[in-house]
Image: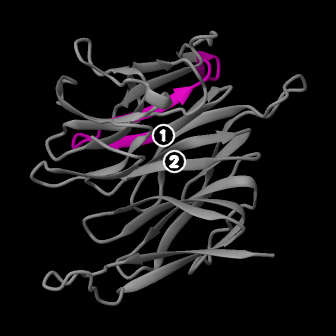
Amino acid sequence: MTMRFLVIVCSICLNMAVVAQYSEPAWHYTIDGFNDADITDLEVDDEGNTYASVNYCGALHLEGNKGRILPDAPHVHGVLLKLDQKGKLIWCHGFKSLFDNRINDLTLDREGNVYITGFGDGLMHFPGKSDNMIVGREKLPNEYHNPQGMYVAKYSKQGERLWVNYWSSKWAEGKSVAVNSEGMVVLSYYSYDALTNKDEVIDPFSRTPNEQVKVSLAYFQPDGKLISIQPFQILKTDSNVRVPRLRFDQQDNLFMYGLFQKSIQLSPEDSLTNDGYYDSWDSYLVKYNKQKELLWYRQLGGQNIQLLDDIDIADDGSVYGTGQYSYECI
């Protein structure tokens, strides 16, 4: 038996006068997993509270959790948790499904509500403070795989479930979620076939030998009602699926970034290409205004892979990014 631990360490104060020195952390919080446990995202609100999403295998113990039973994961299950300014657990939600569910991304709005996206299978449970919402369906006798679906969900800062959109597919994943100052939610996702809500087709798509994966953006009102879906890219292969990550700045401009190969269309008039050297991947960073008009774009190119992992946006609009590359990066 092996035990693996995750520790969140916060409030590290950098000494600006002497490089590479820092004080002791103000607090730490241990996430104790039987087998693997991974923090997939982490955000801090204006009050200093910390929100984190965790995917785990087997069982999970959260320090200070006395009221919530986290379901055992036959494969992988997700957990959403909130810590206060001193690193003490305020609330947590464990998401149960038949075999596999995961949280891929989370974000906060200006009121402290939290949004998550990912996927699940079979009957998936979205807990609230005092009840449980069950979506999806069980496998039919003639089906080989468990039915699968992708979701985007909104929770209040008190941990109450506010709404859930869960769409079924052969395979699909919500990959990134962002919300602007007016509460409009944008979701990026991919799917292998049409997405449905019970019998209603939400996003049609049929695979062909040259069109294997559809990447799209979905826009929602603050109450979770779907506004529109915008197709972004059709990929010819189901390997190395790359879906754009999303961020809003203080002026509600939308930033998108991700990987592409050969070419990618960013607007009706704008596209990027790479030379395909050794089947290489390049990264892109794009800025759109509130009217979805492209303002500018940047490309990170070179040999092999140039991967922009994450960005952050300062109050003055400056963009900071981190990533990795092989051989060279331009």
Q: Given the image, on which type of amino acid does mark 1 rest?
A: Lys
- Look at the image and tell me whether residue 24 can be seen: yes
**Is 261 inside the magenta-drawn segment?**
no
Would you place residue 193 above or below residue 122 in this image? above
Residue at x-position 26% and y-position 86%:
21
Q: Say left or right for 280 vs 236.
A: left
**Alpha-carbon distance for marks 1 and 2?**
6 Å
Q: Earlier in the sequence, mark 1 or mark 2?
A: 2
Q: Which mark is residue 104?
A: 2
Q: Position of residue 53 (x, y in %)?
A: 51, 59
Quadrant housing residue 305: top left
Q: Mark 1 and 2 residues: CB-CB less than 8 Å, in contact?
A: yes
Residue at x-position 36% and y-position 21%:
264
Q: Residue furthest bottom?
A: 24
- Look at the image and tell me whether residue 287 can be seen: no
Task: Name the quadrant of the N terminus.
Answer: bottom right
Residue at x-position 49% and y-position 28%:
279
- Which stretch appears magenta? 175-200
Q: Position of residue 257 (x, y in %)?
A: 33, 38
Asked which secondary structure carries label 1, the reply is strand
**Is 189 inside the magenta-drawn segment?**
yes
Query: What kind of secondary structure does the magenta stretch mostly adopt?
Result: strand
Q: Which residue is mark 1?
A: 175
